[in-house]
């Protein structure tokens, strides 16, 4: 791809703007040598105004979504894109969140501009595990693990039962839940089906990829090893689920 198009697609401006940036000598290599629009150079070597060029398409990010922020591009309140550099909102191909977390759910939220990867992560057939920790309004009854693992739980107004999920009690009102689907308000509705109410909810892992030391509101670009971790051990986690 031509450099002007590559840089414009990353949100630095229109192609005309970027052509001007070349003329003004604002686009250089890592040693500060001015680049020309028809140079052949690896994106990783390009600098704009002395700063490394944003990552090219194929970008995957992990964010620690804080509470009170909506997974949407436009919303009257704060949205997850407000936590990313403004250019990331206008990149082509578009950077999308991989599924959604509710406004009142915190935790690990992935973004990518790779449509095939996004589909691979969210497709129920891929059985990528999503791990949540919930605090509950009432004590666990004791039968939730068997019910969630049974593969027969039908959520209100749905016709297909949920796939088996694994519940671990972390305390009387504290549970870790591992699911492979991403239905609307799934975790809250699962506990509601047992007569309980989720008070706080955090997603702590997707596959074997965890939040690590990402602070609430922070994000980082993922490397190939991190992306591979998303697809690791998804079945192992569920195999340990108690059978009904
Ligand atoms: N389940 C929910 O109920 N909410 C989320 O945000 C994610 C899973």
Image (tube, grey):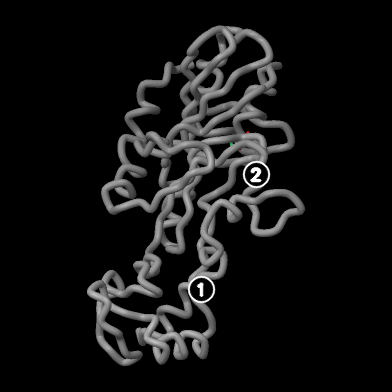
Total numbered labels placed on residues in the image: 2
Closest to the observer, 234 or 74 = 74
| Distance (Cα) linking label 1 and label 2 | 23 Å
Residue 59 position in % (x across, y down): 40, 61
Closest to the observer, 77 or 188 = 77
Residue 197 position in % (x across, y down): 69, 20
Q: Which residue position is annotated with label 2?
A: 69
Residue at image x 72%, y 32%?
156
User: Vertically, is 197 above or below 216?
Assistant: above
Q: Counting other residues with Cα less than 10 Å from the Cα at mark 1, is it few (<14), some (14-19), or many (20 or more)?
A: some
Residue 226 position in % (x across, y down): 31, 46
| View quadrant of ligand 1 | top right
Residue at image x 50%, y 25%?
177
Residue 229 position in % (x across, y down): 31, 42
Chain-order first, disc 1 or disc 2? 1
Q: Secondary structure at mark 2?
A: loop
The yes-or-no answer for disc 2 within 8 Å of ligand 1 is no
The yes-or-no answer for disc 1 within 8 Å of ligand 1 is no
User: Vertically, is 212 above or below 88?
Assistant: above
Q: Which label belongs to residue 11?
A: 1
Closest to the observer, 243 or 115 = 115
Q: In the displayed image of the protein, which residue is found farthest to the right?
A: 76
Residue at image x 66%, y 47%?
70
């Amino acid at each position: 791809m031509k450099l002007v198009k590559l840089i414009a697609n990353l949100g630095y401006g229109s192609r005309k703007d970027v052509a001007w940036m070349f003329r003004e000598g604002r686009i250089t290599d890592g040693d500060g040598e001015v680049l020309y629009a028809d140079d052949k150079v690896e994106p990783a070597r390009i600098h704009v105004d002395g700063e490394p060029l944003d990552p090219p398409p194929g970008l995957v990010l992990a964010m620690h979504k804080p509470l009170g922020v909506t997974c949407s591009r436009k919303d009257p309140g704060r949205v997850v894109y407000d936590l990313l550099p403004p250019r990331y909102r206008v990149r082509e191909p578009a950077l999308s969140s991989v599924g959604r977390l509710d406004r009142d759910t915190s935790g690990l939220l992935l973004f990518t501009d790779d449509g095939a990867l996004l589909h691979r992560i969210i497709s129920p057939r891929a059985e990528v595990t999503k791990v949540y920790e919930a605090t509950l309004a009432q004590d666990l009854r004791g039968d939730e693990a068997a019910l969630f693992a049974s593969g027969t739980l039908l959520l209100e107004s749905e016709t297909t039962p949920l796939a088996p999920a694994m519940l671990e009690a972390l305390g009387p009102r504290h549970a870790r839940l591992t699911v492979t689907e991403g239905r609307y308000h799934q975790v809250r509705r699962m506990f509601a089906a047992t007569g309980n109410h989720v008070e706080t909810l955090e997603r702590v892992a997707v596959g074997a990829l965890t939040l690590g030391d990402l602070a609430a509101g922070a994000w980082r670009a993922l490397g190939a090893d991190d992306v591979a971790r998303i697809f690791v051990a998804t079945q192992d986690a569920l195999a340990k689920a108690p059978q009904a």
